[in-house]
Image (spheres, rainbow, N blue to C red):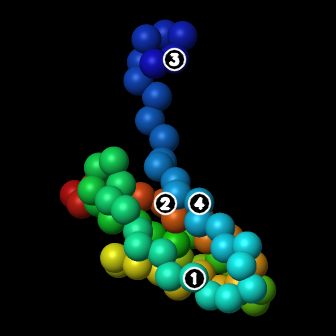
Amino acid sequence: VNEMGQPLVDDTFLVLLNSSHESVRYTVPDGPHAHGWEQVLDTNDLEEPFKSAAIEEWIELQPRSVVLLREKAAQQ
């Protein structure tokens, strides 16, 4: 809560790092709210690093890259 007693709400992020010289397949865990994940950053994609993409059960990280995932919002 903030200083006025109101709840603070923010996104949940997951940072995946691959420091290997080979691709690595990560199994993506359930988020705290189990809404699934979307990719918001992939440092391997130099042309469009901030491309959004839905992520299912796993993701393949390219060598020496960072991927940032954000938990999807609840369905309305």
**Residue named by callout 4:** 15
User: Which of disc 2 and disc 1 is earlier in sequence?
Assistant: 1
**Residue named by callout 3:** 2
Query: Could you tell me which secondary element the residue under label 4 belongs to?
Result: strand
Cα distance in 3D space between marks 1 and 4? 14 Å
Give the quadrant of the C terminus.
bottom left
**Residue named by callout 2:** 70
What residue is rendered at 41% in x and 58% in y?
71
Q: Amino acid at mark 1?
A: Val
Q: Residue furthest left?
A: 76
Q: Residues within 10 Å of mark 1 (few under 14, many from 20)?
A: some
- In this rendering, which labeled residue sits more in front, label 2 or label 4? 4
Cα distance in 3D space between marks 1 and 2? 20 Å
Q: Amino acid at mark 4?
A: Val
Q: Residue furthest top?
A: 4
Q: Residues within 10 Å of mark 2 (few under 14, many from 20)?
A: many
- In this rendering, which labeled residue sits more in front, label 3 or label 4? 4
Cα distance in 3D space between marks 2 and 4? 9 Å
What residue is rendered at 51% in x and 17% in y?
2
The answer to whether 41 is drawn above or below residue 23 in the figure is above
Front residue of 15/2: it is 15
User: Which of disc 1 and disc 3 is earlier in sequence?
Assistant: 3
Q: Amino acid at mark 2?
A: Arg
User: Which of disc 2 and disc 3 is earlier in sequence?
Assistant: 3
What residue is rendered at 41% in x and 73% in y?
27
